[in-house]
């Protein structure tokens, strides 16, 4: 089956190509691309917030931002955190890089599959990465007691846990995360990656950021781009005790945040209600999307507390071919997971999106599974455009 998608574009790294790169390669059809690949909040910022940003765009782009400490202090006020416990960065991956350089000296344990930078970054600097496999038979659920035993048996000096996990969206209750941290007080570092924690609705206040700030060796990582639907700005932060957070602040460049990040952080104080509404809408869409996809006989949908769903394809269905078909024929971009450690290309990750976008996704999946139906739909569209 021929596709206009450049397969090499997806083989350059263990991560997906950017939306911009893919849309440029697709030419005119790329302008209609619907992104089910990059986890992003579709409801925030609101159109009114974008209008406000646009009205100040010349000033935002023309002048230097404040230093990182000023921006971080404002974020701390919005979040109700002590600014001494916070360090803000140009994206959460910048913090992963610096944590590796500062605090991972010999070995790190991490369940897989998970976000690729947690395995790739320490391997790139010659550290031993102890990978704890999450089993498909268990629905990729993490058994914390088994993970602690694995850390002890391997002698890992740093432990990482993503909650919810990427790509499956599995969530561990707050009380169990606290117990996990307290069982590993002798390690050099324990990292709880909460990049997707704001999307959790299984319990109230699921974050352990406040608990991390009073523990000797715990760092909680946050990604603002995912939560606020602004990946292009590149901003994230960590929460830890003042000693750890202060060391990270001193390590990071003084002007590592841009003026757009500053503008958004100072807008947040007045838009908390809109942000909460966006999370409520996304939780609604997650349930509806999961229910709809579960009705397709060739898909197995895993429960998720994040803003994406992990889907397993039936035997004989090639996820790579389906990804290329969806891009080429339907301008729908999904995350095929064949290059994720612990997965195969029978798994795809689908970002939660509004109902009209999901209808287009389902139409495309149905068309891939039933080519004759898809060809007939393409003929009808062409006849409608020619009329």
Image: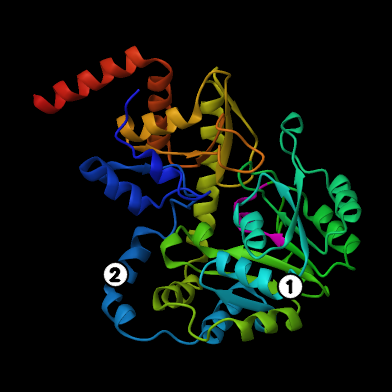
254, above or below 79, in the image: below
Q: Mark 2 points at which residue?
A: 54
Q: Residue at x 72, y 50 (%)?
A: 203
State left or right for residue 25 relative to residue 84.
left
- Measured Cα–Cα span from mark 2 to mark 1: 40 Å
Residue plotted at (71% across, 56% down): 206
Q: Can residue 278 be seen in this view?
A: yes
Front-lying residue, 64 or 317:
317
* Nearer-the-camera pick, 69 or 250: 250
Q: Please say whether residue 230 is visible from this viewpoint.
A: no
| The stretch drawn in magenta includes residue 198 | yes
Disc assigned to residue 103:
1
Residue 33 as seen in the image, left or right of residue 95: left
Q: Where is residue 176 in the image (x, y as percent from the top left)?
A: 83, 53
Outermost left residue: 387
Image position, residue 168 (x, y; %): 63, 41
| Boundaries of the magenta span | 192-201
Q: Coloring scheme of the render?
A: rainbow
Q: Which residue is most to the front?
A: 126
Q: Work out whether 355 lies above or below 295.
A: below
Q: Does the magenta stretch include residue 115?
A: no
Residue visible at 67% across and 68% down in the picture: 100
Among numbered discs 2 and 1, the one appearing first in the sequence:
2
Compare residues 7 and 53 and report the one nearer the observer: 7
Locate residue 225 relative to residue 251 in the image: left or right: left
- x 66%, y 55%: residue: 119
Considering the image in quadrants, where does the N terminus appear? top left
């Amino acid at each position: 089956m021929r596709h206009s998608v450049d397969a090499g574009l997806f083989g350059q790294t263990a991560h997906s190509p950017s939306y911009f790169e893919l849309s440029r390669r697709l030419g005119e059809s790329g302008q209609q691309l619907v992104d089910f690949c990059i986890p992003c909040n579709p409801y925030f910022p609101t159109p009114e917030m974008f209008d406000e940003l646009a009205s100040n765009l010349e000033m935002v782009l023309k002048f230097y931002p404040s230093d990182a400490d000023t921006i971080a202090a404002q974020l701390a006020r919005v979040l109700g955190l002590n600014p001494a416990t916070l360090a803000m960065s140009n994206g959460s991956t910048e913090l992963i890089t610096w944590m590796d350089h500062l605090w991972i000296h010999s070995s790190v344990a991490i369940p897989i599959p998970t976000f690729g930078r947690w395995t790739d970054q320490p391997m790139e600097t010659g550290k031993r990465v102890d990978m704890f496999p999450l089993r498909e038979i268990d629905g990729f659920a993490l058994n914390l007691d088994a993970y602690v035993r694995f850390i002890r048996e391997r002698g890992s000096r740093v432990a990482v846990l993503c909650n919810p996990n990427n790509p499956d969206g599995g969530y561990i209750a707050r009380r169990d995360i606290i117990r996990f941290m307290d069982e590993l007080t002798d390690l050099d570092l324990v990292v709880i990656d909460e990049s997707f924690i704001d999307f959790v609705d299984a319990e109230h206040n699921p974050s352990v950021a406040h608990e991390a700030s009073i523990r000797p060796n715990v760092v909680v990582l946050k990604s603002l781009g995912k939560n606020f639907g602004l990946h292009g700005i590149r901003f994230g932060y960590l929460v830890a005790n003042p000693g750890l957070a202060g060391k990270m602040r001193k390590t990071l460049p003084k002007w590592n945040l841009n003026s757009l990040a500053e503008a958004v952080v100072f807008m947040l104080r007045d838009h908390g209600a809109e942000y909460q509404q966006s999370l409520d809408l996304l939780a609604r869409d997650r349930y509806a999307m999961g229910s709809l996809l579960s009705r397709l006989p060739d898909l197995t949908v895993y429960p998720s507390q994040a803003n994406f769903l992990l889907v397993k394809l039936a035997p004989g269905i090639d996820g790579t071919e389906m990804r290329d078909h969806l891009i080429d024929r339907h301008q729908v971009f999904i995350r095929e997971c064949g290059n994720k450690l612990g997965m195969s290309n029978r798994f795809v990750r689908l970002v939660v999106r509004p109902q009209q976008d999901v209808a287009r996704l389902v139409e495309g999946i149905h068309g891939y599974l039933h080519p004759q139906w898809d060809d007939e739909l393409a003929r009808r569209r062409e006849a409608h455009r020619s009329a």
